[in-house]
Image (tube, helix red, strand yellow):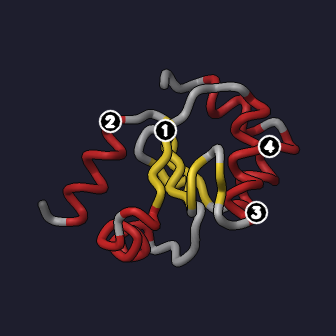
Amino acid sequence: MEVNAKIEEQLKSHDILLYMKGTPDFPQCGFSGQAVAALNAIGKPYAFVNIFEDEEVRQGLKEYSNWPTFPQLYVKGELIGGSDIVIEMYHSGELKTLLEGSDS
């Protein structure tokens, strides 16, 4: 399967999807850990993809999203941003509003 098609299938399958380094139980970088903490604090279920387990997706996502770093949070197929944006939106309340508007 072509990498963009694989990414699009993952995005269609989950309303809230976090591409991250590691897993929510064991983030493998501080930025992924911060994004997980914000999502967990809101309490809305979300899916994740450990980019270390799929090199093709890890590299392909950088081009697909035009966003070179991880984590990357998507809601309803739309890139929200990385850790800094997720944390900023969490503190402003925007992230909770956005996530509560989706059905995961």
Quick check: marks 1 and 4 in contact, CB under 8 Å?
no
Tell me the mark number nearer the camera, choosing from 4 and 2.
2
Tell me the mark number nearer the camera, choosing from 2 and 1.
1
Q: Residues within 10 Å of mark 2 (few under 14, many from 20)?
A: some
Disc 4 on helix, strand or loop? helix
Tell me where residue 19 appears, x and y as whole percent. Answer: 50, 56
Quick check: marks 2 and 3 in contact, CB under 8 Å?
no
Tell me the mark number nearer the camera, choosing from 1 and 4.
1
Quick check: marks 4 and 2 in contact, CB under 8 Å?
no
Q: Which residue is mark 2?
A: 13
Name the residue rendered at 50%, 48% in the picture: 74
Q: Which residue is mark 1?
A: 47
Tell me the mark number nearer the camera, choosing from 3 and 1.
1
Name the residue rendered at 58%, 27% in the picture: 45
Q: Label 1 is placed on what type of residue? A: Ala
Quick check: marks 2 and 1 in contact, CB under 8 Å?
yes
Nearest to N terminus: mark 3 or mark 1 = 1
Q: Which residue is mark 4?
A: 90
> Gap in Å between the C-alphas at discs 2 and 1?
9 Å
Disc 2 on helix, strand or loop? helix
Kindly identify which numbered label has been placed on residue 14: none
Q: Which residue is mark 3?
A: 84
Q: Label 4 is placed on what type of residue? A: Tyr
> Gap in Å between the C-alphas at discs 3 and 4?
10 Å
Q: Residues within 10 Å of mark 3 (few under 14, many from 20)?
A: few
